[in-house]
Image (cartoon, grey):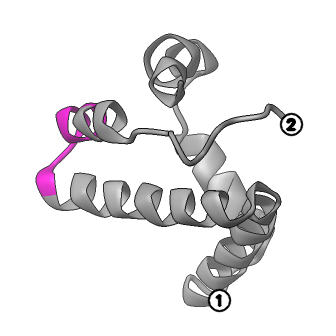
């Protein structure tokens, strides 16, 4: 796992990119989710996998499916690796 200084991590550029990519209500929800995840990472970065697992299970319950179904659905909707590396990864410092 990469060592990242979460305390100095700035969401401004990422938030601007998220706002540019989608409708305002969804973009603002995504930014809020990033703020919450960053809050957790600042407490202890080792909590992030646990947060992902917990959220996946909660979504599975809401959507009446399995955690694997949730992850597979997100995988199918995810951006290609090249776009991640070229457009978004630089925004994470």
Where is residue 6 shown, x and y percent of the image?
60, 45
Kindly indicate the quadrant of the structure image that contains residue 81: top right
Say which label, 1 or 2, has the lower sequence index: 2
Where is residue 5 shown, x and y percent of the image?
64, 38
The structure residue drawn at horizontal position 59% and vertical position 52%, both measured from the top left corner, is 74
In front: 56, or 43? 43
Kindly indicate the quadrant of the structure image that contains residue 45: bottom right
Q: Is residue 86 located in the magenta-colored stretch of the structure?
A: no
In the rendered image of this protein, does residue 72 appear above or below residue 85? below
Tell me the number on the disc at residue 61.
Answer: 1
The structure residue drawn at horizontal position 52% and vertical position 30%, both measured from the top left corner, is 92
In the rendered image of this protein, does residue 61 appear above or below residue 90? below
Q: Which residues are drawn in magenta?
A: 17-24
Whether residue 70 sits left or right of residue 79 in the image: it is: right
Q: Is residue 22 located in the magenta-colored stretch of the structure?
A: yes
Where is residue 25 shown, x and y percent of the image?
17, 61
Whether residue 47 sits left or right of residue 20 in the image: it is: right
Tell which residue pokes out farthest to the left in this image: 24
Whether residue 12 sits left or right of residue 55 in the image: it is: left
SS at mark 2?
loop
SS at mark 1?
helix
In the rendered image of this protein, does residue 23 appear above or below residue 20? below
Image marks 1 and 2: residues in contact by CB distance under 8 Å: no
Name the residue beneath numbered marker 2.
1
């Amino acid at each position: 796992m990469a060592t990242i200084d979460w305390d100095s991590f700035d969401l401004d550029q990422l938030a601007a990119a998220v706002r540019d990519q989608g409708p305002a209500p969804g973009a603002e929800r995504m930014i809020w989710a990033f703020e919450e995840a960053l809050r957790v990472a600042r407490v202890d970065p080792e909590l992030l996998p646990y947060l992902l697992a917990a959220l996946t299970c909660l979504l599975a319950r809401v959507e009446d499916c399995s955690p694997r179904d949730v992850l597979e659905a997100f995988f199918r909707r995810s951006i290609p690796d090249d776009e991640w590396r070229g457009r978004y990864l630089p925004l994470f410092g």
